[in-house]
Amino acid sequence: MQVDRGLLLKVRERNLTVPLTGQWRDETDLGGDLRLEGAVDVDGLLSREEGGYRFRGSLTTRVVGACDRCMTPVNMELHVPVEATFTTAPETDASEEAEPVGEVPNYPLEKDGELDLSPAFHESLIFALPMKVLCQEDCLGLCPRCGALLAQGPCGCSDEPVDPRLSPLQALLSGKGRSET
Ligand SMILES: [Zn+2]
Ligand SMILES: [Zn+2]
């Protein structure tokens, strides 16, 4: 999300904190199985920062994917707080121990002083994605034998070991052998 130059000028010269709202589209792949559905709503404040700017706000969007256990499509809202600074010079001074500035990530300003918030937004989204996607907390998944959706009730398969590699062994053990083939 590219910030308008006029707005940047206001923020810098008058030391203002201005509201920054709008829609942003993440053109970069999120990685993994989840993807964004539509645009991201951006709502926050842009203020001056030593050597650059600070954005503080939130992103709201919908992500779609499939349940890790049963493959049912999942569509959920993601609300992600974002705080980041954008500065020209690196904040760390080689001669001094870098003071930990909290958990606020810093991004470089583009050479001509333009401000693009996209990298910060993109990384915040990726960080906020759930590690595990489930259609519901206690999703029962699929029957490993017949593939039936177990949430729809028992499929009728027995509880015997399901590994098909074991069945010839079981046949041997039960004395049947494989003579019929
Ligand atoms: Zn599921
Ligand atoms: Zn089954």
Image (cartoon, rainbow, N blue to C red):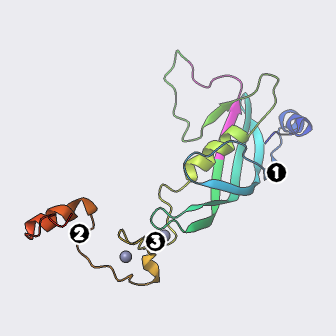
In this rendering, which labeled residue sits more in front, label 3 or label 2?
2
Sequence-first disc among 2 and 1? 1
Residue under numbered circle 2: 161
Give the residue drawn at x 39%, y 81%: 155
* Relative vertical location of residue 180 with respect to residue 45 in this rendering, above or below: below
Pointer 1 residue? 19
| Place of residue 130 in the rendered image (x, y in percent of width and height, measured from the top left) | 52, 57
Q: Element at badge 3?
A: loop
Q: Is residue 150 left or right of residue 7?
A: left
- Image mark for residue 173: none
Q: Position of residue 105 (x, y in %)?
A: 60, 37
Among numbered discs 1 and 3, the one appearing first in the sequence: 1
- Within-10-Å neighbours for mark 3: few <14, some 14–19, many 20+: few
User: At label 1, which amino acid type do we have?
Assistant: Pro
Residue identifier under label 3: 137
Nearest to N terminus: mark 3 or mark 2: 3
User: Is 91 inside the magenta-drawn segment?
Assistant: yes
- Which residue occupies 71% across, 24% down? 88
Which stretch appears magenta?
83-93
Q: Within 8 Å of ligand 1, the CB of disc 3?
A: no
The answer to whether 105 appears left or right of 174 in the picture is right
Residue 115's x, y, as percent?
A: 79, 34
Instruction: Look at label 3 and name its amino acid.
Output: Glu
Check disc 1 and report its element: helix, strand or loop: strand
Seen from the viewer's position, the closer of residues 160 and 174 is 174
Type of the residue with mark 2: Pro
SS at badge 2:
loop
Instruction: Give residue 146's position: percent from left, percent from top.
Output: 39, 72
Query: For the point 23% across and 69% down, which residue is it?
Result: 161
Question: Left or right: where does residue 129 sit relative to residue 140?
Answer: right
